[in-house]
Image (cartoon, grey):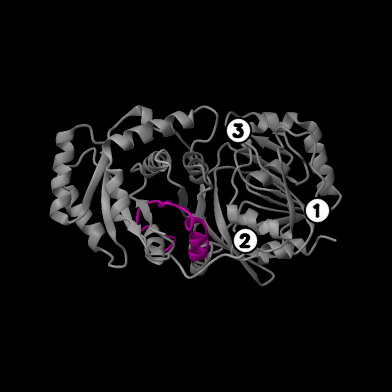
């Protein structure tokens, strides 16, 4: 089946690629096309917006946290039934963990999909020519097939940019004007996900603008392909265990990799619950508390005393738990938010966390736990104000092999870390945890 495949990237971050991607996803969906979104890298926020815009679950593609074959496999699985597969890049096109490693360009090359550049043209006209020439010719392993300009206010400005494209041999596919109605606010971990923004309205506005000033027919035509994307195909697996698995998932706990959830489902029945709204923890053999924004909902989490007591009792009785980042903060004694207000949390872990006077911690992570390697990512601003947690026998390094301050902690059968572990490709970390289920 012929379908369109392309990767949206940019020369640098903050060029508007997420805004454009959301508009394209919705505009193509409005054409009654089946649209499958993907996100390069470990980002947790953009896929939430992608899923809303396209109506299909967005999937992370990451060649640092997982193997090339895994990326090929999940791309083939999810794009196979789509009319259009739209992948949003991360940072600048060639920015990876180490030079190009794990970059958007590396993923475009691996999957053989063309790149559509988003260029911020606010202070640019013919100077777009050498910029585009460099990105088109720097690395022959990728195909920069077209460009969409952002922040273009007049048709005459766009004509200058079209001339630059013609001289370089990169097709100009259209532009977006500067418009505050198309802006999505940012938060400390990426795009904003609180209730302060009407995302549906913004997505609709961007989709309307895209439909007026971007040549969607041409975009679909130059990115259409008949050949199969990959020789790999996913196979479904029956549950290899019959565990009851509880996964926290609400407005406070949103940072979930779909592939992690798919692998979890192989071990038993998953029940999603809300630490904000539900009254108690569902019956479970394994509790997974992912990251999110618990600091934004600290008051509500603290006020839900029955849930806190239920989770605390489960952990203190030896229930198997993995809590990462925001989940760790929730299991601590107290959480201090950005306004300096301190709230009681579960109290299952001997630590206190705070959003005050802390620094950004960001980067890929490689863990070694008693000889078992596991990979993931870390991105947070919170920090410990008190930490009496015992460390598990795990060493965690950054992408260059330098040991970090990040630790894997254990109390009873509760394990916690600021690291978000990706076990969608390598089940070893999860299997090592689940060995403790009696």
Q: Determine contact: label 3, label 2, CB under 8 Å.
A: no
Helix, strand or loop at mark 1:
loop
- Quick one: label 2, few (<14), some, or many (20+) residues within 10 Å? many
Residue at x-position 71% and y-position 63%: 238
Q: Residue 151, how many percent across, how many down?
A: 27, 36
Helix, strand or loop at mark 3:
helix
Q: Is residue 189 magenta?
A: no
For residue 285, which numbered disc appears in the image? 1
- Which image quadrant for residue 16? top left
For residue 296, which numbered disc appears in the image? 3
Q: Is residue 221 left or right of 412 when viewed as pictured? A: left
Helix, strand or loop at mark 2:
loop
Q: Is residue 336 left or right of 173 when viewed as pictured? A: right
Judging depth in this view, the residue of 323 and 390 nearest the camera is: 323
* N-terminal-most mark, 3 or 2: 3
Q: Residue 50, how many percent across, how many down?
A: 48, 43
For residue 423, which numbered disc appears in the image? 2
Residue at x-position 75% and y-position 47%: 349
Q: Determine contact: label 3, label 1, CB under 8 Å.
A: no
The residue mark sitting in front, 3 or 2, is 2
* N-terminal-most mark, 3 or 1: 1
């Amino acid at each position: 089946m012929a379908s369109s495949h392309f990767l949206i990237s940019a020369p640098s971050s903050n060029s508007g690629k997420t805004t454009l991607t959301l508009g394209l996803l919705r505009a193509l969906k409005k054409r009654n096309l089946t649209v499958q979104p993907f996100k390069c890298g470990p980002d947790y926020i953009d896929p939430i917006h992608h899923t809303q815009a396209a109506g299909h679950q967005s999937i992370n593609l990451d060649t640092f946290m997982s193997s090339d074959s895994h990326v090929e496999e999940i791309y083939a699985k999810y794009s196979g039934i789509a009319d259009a597969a739209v992948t949003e890049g991360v940072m600048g096109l060639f920015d990876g963990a180490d030079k190009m490693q794990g970059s958007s360009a590396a993923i475009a090359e691996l999957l053989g999909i063309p790149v559509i550049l988003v260029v911020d043209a606010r202070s640019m006209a013919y100077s777009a020519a050498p910029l585009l020439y460099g990105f088109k010719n720097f690395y022959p392993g990728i195909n920069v097939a077209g460009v969409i300009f952002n922040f273009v206010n007049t048709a005459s400005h766009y004509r200058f940019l079209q001339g630059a494209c013609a001289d370089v041999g990169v097709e100009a596919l259209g532009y977006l004007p500067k418009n505050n109605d198309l802006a999505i606010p940012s938060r400390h971990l990426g795009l904003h996900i609180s209730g302060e923004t009407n995302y549906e309205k913004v997505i609709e506005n961007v989709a309307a603008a895209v439909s007026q000033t971007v040549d969607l027919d041409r975009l679909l035509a130059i990115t259409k392909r008949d050949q199969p994307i990959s020789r790999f195909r996913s196979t479904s697996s029956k549950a290899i265990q019959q565990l009851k698995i509880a996964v926290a998932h609400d407005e406070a706990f949103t940072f979930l990799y779909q592939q992690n959830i798919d692998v979890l489902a192989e071990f038993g029945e998953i029940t999603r619950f809300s630490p904000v709204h539900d009254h108690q923890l569902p019956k479970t053999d394994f509790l997974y508390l992912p990251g999110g924004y618990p600091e934004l909902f600290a008051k509500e989490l603290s006020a839900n005393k029955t849930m806190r007591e239920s989770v605390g009792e489960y952990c203190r009785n030896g229930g198997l738990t993995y809590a990462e980042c925001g989940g760790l903060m929730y299991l601590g004694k107290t959480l201090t938010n950005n306004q300096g207000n301190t709230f009681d949390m579960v109290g299952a872990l001997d630590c206190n966390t705070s959003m005050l006077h802390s620094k950004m911690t960001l980067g890929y992570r490689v863990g070694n736990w008693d000889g078992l390697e596991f990979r993931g990512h870390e991105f947070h601003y919170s920090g410990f104000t008190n930490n009496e947690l015992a460390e598990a026998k795990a060493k965690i390094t950054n992408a260059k092999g330098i040991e970090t301050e990040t630790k894997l902690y254990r109390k009873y059968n509760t394990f916690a870390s600021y690291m978000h572990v990706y076990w969608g490709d390598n089940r070893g970390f999860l299997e090592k945890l689940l060995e403790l289920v009696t």
